[in-house]
Image (cartoon, grey):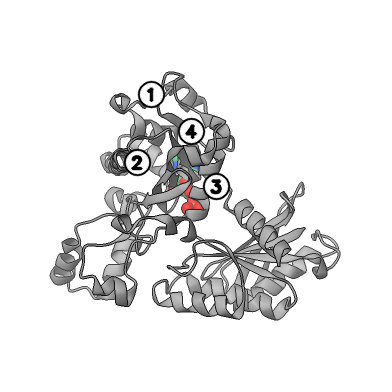
Amino acid sequence: MKVLILNCGSSSIKYKLYDDDQQLAEGLLEKIGTAEAQLGHTVAGRKKVVSVHEILEHQAGIELILKALVDPEKGVLTSIEDIQAVGHRVVHGAESFSESTLITPEVVAKIEECIDIAPLHNPPNLAGIYAISHLLPKVPQVAVFDTAFHQTMPDKAFMYAIPYVFYARNHIRKYGFHGISHYYVSHEAAAMLGRAVDELKLITCHLGNGSSVTAVDHGRSVDTSMGFTPLEGLPMGTRCGDIDPAVPLYIMGKEELNLQQINALLNKHSGVLGISGVSNDFRTLEEESDKGDKRATLALEVFCYRLKKYIGSYIAAMNGADAIVFTGGIGENSDAVREMVVKDMEFLGVELDADKNRAKKGGVAADISKPSSRIKVLVIPTNEELVIARDTRRIAAAN
Ligand code: ADP
C-alpha cells in the first residue's frame, strides 16, 4: 500500500512516501509563507533535487509536493491516485486520543479543540489535514499523535500540584511528547534483547533539538520528562527544561518582561545555548569544549547530569530497569554525551563498554554495555515516520 506521511510545521512540511515499509521518496519544504520557499525532494537511490517557489500557505505547499511526486523526471508515482492513504503527525491529542485514529469530521473537531493547549503545533498539523481533504478528498487520512503513547501514565505521574480545578477545567497536566519515538525504540529494544516488550522495564532517552526521557514499564509509558508543553524536563538546545517556577516570575519583575518575552526567553534563548552562549548544536558545543570553552563544557555537564538524575528516578519509579536506550540526533551520535550520562552508575548495575561506545557509528543499532551489565545500554536510531506509515496502513486497511 502506498502511503504519504506528512509532518506539517508552522513554516515547513516534511514528507515521506512509503510502499509498505519501503521508502520511495522523501523531502522537506521550508520557508512556507514566502516567495523563496525551498523544496528539497529525494527519490530513493537518486540525488536530491532542490527548487525554489512562491508558497504562501500549506495547501499550496502540499500541491507542490504532490506535483513533485508525479513529476515525469523527479517523481516516483505515475498518478496521484496511487496514494492510498495519508498519515499525519499530530503533536497534541490531549486526553482525547490514546492511539492513532482515522480522521473523521469528529476527530478534526477534537484536534481543533486541542489548539487551546497546543497553539503553535496543532494549527499547522490541521492545515495539512484540511489541504489533503481538499486535494485528495477520497483518500483516507490517519492522525498519529505525539502525546498518545503517554496516555497510559497514571494520575500520580501526570498531575501537577496546583489547585485541582486547573486540571478539571483547563486540562492542565503532564501530557508528554515524542511518544512516537519512545514507542518505536522501546519495541526495537525488545527485539534487540530478544524479549517481549511487555516483560521489560526500559528507559528511553530521545535526545535531539528537543529532548525527553520516558519510563516504559511493560510496554506502557508510566512517566516522561516533558509536560503540559515540550518545555518541561531536560534542558534542551534552546529550552530551559525543569526550573523553579519562581524564576520566570522573578525575571519578569526585574527586567519588566511581558508574557511573550518570557516565553521566548525560556523557549528560544535558554537550554544549552543559554548556558554556553555558544550554540544549541551539540557538535559545536563538543568542539568548543574540547578547545577549552568552559561554558560549553558546563552546558554539556548540566545536560548530562540532569539526564542522569532522570534515569535514576525512573529506575526507582519502576523498581529497576532492563535497558537504557539512546536515540535522536544526540543520543545516536554523541558518544561523549552517552558516556557522561551513564558513567559512575555501576552501583545501579549500569556498566558501559567505553570502547564499544566510542566505536559506535551513526545509523546502526548497538549494545554498548559490558556483557556483565545488569542494565543494558542500547543505541537505536529512531524512525518515527515508519511508525506513522505502519499505523496509517493498518488503520486505512481496516476502514
Ligand atoms: P530534531 O529534534 O529536530 O529531530 P535531531 O534528532 O536530528 O533533531 O537532533 C539534532 C541534534 O543532534 C543537534 O543538536 C545536533 O547537534 C545533534 N547531533 C547530530 N549529530 C551529532 C554528533 N555527531 N555529535 C553530537 N551531536 C550531534
Three-letter amino acid code at disc 2? Answer: Met
Q: Residues within 10 Å of mark 1 (few under 14, many from 20)?
A: many
Find out whether the residues at labels 3 and 1 contact each other: C-beta distance under 8 Å. Answer: no
User: What kind of residue is marked 4?
Assistant: Leu
Mark 4 and mark 3 lie on one chain; the one further toward the N terminus is 3
Which residue does the numbered mark 3 point to in the structure image?
184
Disc 4 target residue = 378
Q: Are marks 2 and 1 in contact (CB under 8 Å)?
A: no
Residue beneath disc 1: 351
**Residue at x 74%, y 52% (from the top left corner):** 20
Q: Under tag 4, what secondary structure?
A: strand
- Mark 3 element type: helix
x and y, in percent, of residue 43 in the image:
75, 54
Give the CA separation, mark 2 to mark 1.
19 Å
Real-space CA distance between mark 2 and mark 4, rounded to the nearest whole angstrom: 18 Å
Q: Residue at x 26, y 69 (%)?
A: 262
Task: Sort mark 4 into few (<14), some (14-19) or many (20+) by Cα contacts within 10 Å.
Answer: many
234 vs 376: above or below: below
First in sequence: mark 2 or mark 1? 2
Labels 4 and 1: the sequence-earlier one: 1
Decide if ligand 1 comes within 8 Å of the CB at mark 1: no
Q: Position of residue 166 (x, y in %)?
A: 27, 73
Residue 318 has which mark?
Answer: 2
Q: CA distance from mark 2 to mark 3?
A: 20 Å
